[in-house]
Amino acid sequence: PIKNLGRGKVPMETPSLSDQYEPIPEETPKNRKQQLILSAVAGLFVLGAVANYSPSMLSSQSSLSESGLLQIEFSNEYTAIHGHPATDYHWVKDGYLVEPHRSTSLSIIGVPDTLDESKLTTSCVGTHKQSGEKVHGTNAGSKQCQMKFLKVGDYTVEASVISSDTDQILTTSVDVQSRYVRRDIRKITEEDKANYLNAARTLYDINTADGIQIYGENYKCMIYFGTLHLENSVPDKYHDHLHDGLGFLTQHMSLTNEYELALQSVNPSVAMPYWDFTQDMVIIRDKAKANKRAVDYQDLWELDLWQDDFFGTSDTHLHTVTKGRWAYTRVPKISRETEVANPYGYMRAPWNLDVSPYITRFHKSCGDNMGSKGDYETNQWPTCAIHHYAVSSIDSWAYFTGYMAIDAHGGVHRLIGGAGGDCDNWGEMLDLLGPEKVSNLREYATFLGRFVWRESTCTMPSSEKCDGSTKNKKAGDNECKLHCVGCTNDKFTEDELTTYAGYFHSFDDASKFQVAEMTRKVFCDSKIVVGEQIEANSAIDATFWPIHPTLERLLHYKQMVNPLTNFDWDGSLWRSDWSSGCCWGDMFDTDCTGHYEESPTVGKSYVYDDEEGDWMLKSMTNRAMLESAFTTHTYKNAYVYADFSYEHCEKEGITFKKVSKKSQTSA
């Protein structure tokens, strides 16, 4: 069954608000007269264009903001370095997208030079179009004010420049859009990085009930998110509502959205960053080239994201982080029998025989440096070529989401989580099987437990046999291991050997003796442990969360430059064994709950509701989730992606085309 996980067409690897707001004076006859005088004076100094500051135009938003006269320029700590965000979205007016709860500078451009700047003050107010709530800015200089927009949505911003000499006033207004901006995790400021990671850490440290009392109703702790992902991944042996089907991407988009809301309840300035992991491959390839050696995947774990101040480095002996904010982060114990747990009672998949109380990361599979050899499917760290193929060569939604599920990101989970335990000793079979087959065994170890449990080839030990005592921590000396068909017999039947050999693609030419010895060693005598990132409780590891926004960003980009044309919810467009909409439906002749286009998403999203005419938190269907992400007229999300730059890929000879607003369609 595992060898049938093959992808479709494979790309070739190619090169607090302030009370200091000064209200606009009411328009008395005196003030009105002063405005007219100021307009006239201004006109004398602007090529005699007295009409440019006429009373009618002073009250007109469009003429002042669009005619090149008084304008409001918005900026924050990012714009000076990276420019204005989200300018590739056709509905975003360049420079007029602001960010909730981020200090924003408003500069008034076009004030006549005849006015004494030392006598000028600026006031500004923003009115939220959906709720009518106002936010007031503070004077920050002769022609500037500071403001924090507190809501997602649309604002009308009014600014006034006031002269203390004569009470003369110039006013202008403009509409802006307020959205959270998701940025490259490597490009966010140190302050934003700390805010994000500290908010994420809070979800581990404060339970949901207490968190709601402190932070509000959108707060959810990591037990909530871990359980949500785990129980929808393993509702039973025959279903997975989140993976291996057409709902994969939209379901994970919804999970990310609800997680982001929880982070924002702790710190409302936080936007979920994305991790473009194709950059990591470019970096380690450059390192290998500079050192004139082959690419070593272990170089990945020396990069910035794995340092103590970020996600932390996994100890090579304990296989968990021992320093920094993520040191010794515990996996919750399950107290209710109805919840999904491993035999030791930890919030893990039933097939994961990991006794460690801490989040586990092996970064290898049974001692094998994954990806350095066959690069089979999810064993490969995603590259620029893989993501470029998704943009340039896929036209159906079904194929795109299948490709996202496996090729475009699977290797990240697998290489972070990895596998260990007794399988570290499978090298003992080198003489019997040869290096290719042993390597094949090791790279499949991360998936074995899942498949043999779902197919009932093996059963898991009971919790009584995995009590976590000292004697039971040593693999192989107790009953806390797989109980597989045929293992209690002296010999395996032909059918049993065929079943076991079928889990590995390299055993088609193996002798019966080789298959029997392999089966005894791998399935009967080994206790395999997998890291969180490659099993059903992957969401409990903080590194899980920036992964999937990268795939959604790729979808946004694709819809801008080479839109999908076929939105049939037909799994066979990806692979024949997804014809029912998911692989488990085909394998077990069951339904594909969670993967149909009208299946509700497990996570809730904050989106604009056309019928209500306001922003709402709600669960959506897969189809509605997909349409909410379309980057044209149907875009309804509370966030955007800062940019769609893939410049790092040019080092590998791969160019992602520039976005053209004019070419964007409604697809």
Image: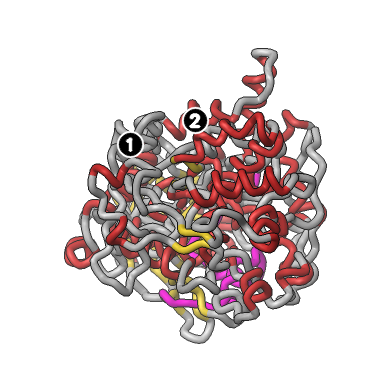
**Foreground residue among 487 and 471:** 487
Q: Which colour scheme is used?
A: secondary structure
- Kindly identify which numbered label has been placed on residue 353: none
- Kindly identify which numbered label has been placed on residue 301: 2
- Residue lying at the far front in this picture: please name it: 490
User: Label 2 is placed on what type of residue?
Assistant: Trp
**Foreground residue among 270 and 28:** 270
* Residue 159 visible in the shown view: no
Q: Quadrant of residue 338?
A: bottom left
Front tag of 2 and 1: 2
Q: Where is residue 49 in the image (x, y as percent from the top left)?
A: 61, 51
* SS at circle 2: helix
Q: Where is residue 614 in the image (x, y as percent from the top left)?
A: 45, 78
Q: Where is residue 599 in the image (x, y as percent from the top left)?
A: 56, 80
Does 511 sit above or below residue 649?
A: below
* SS at circle 1: helix
> Which residues make up the magenta segment?
617-644
Q: Where is residue 140 in the image (x, y as percent from the top left)?
A: 32, 43
Assign the C terminus to one quadrant of the image. bottom right
Assign the N terminus to one quadrant of the image. bottom right
User: Label 1 is placed on what type of residue?
Assistant: Ser
**Residue labelled with disc 1:** 118
The crowd level at tag 1 (other Cα within 10 Å; few <14, some 14-19, many 20+) is few
The crowd level at tag 2 (other Cα within 10 Å; few <14, some 14-19, many 20+) is some
Distance between mark 2 and mark 1 Cα atoms: 55 Å
Residue at 46% across / 59% down in the picture? Answer: 483
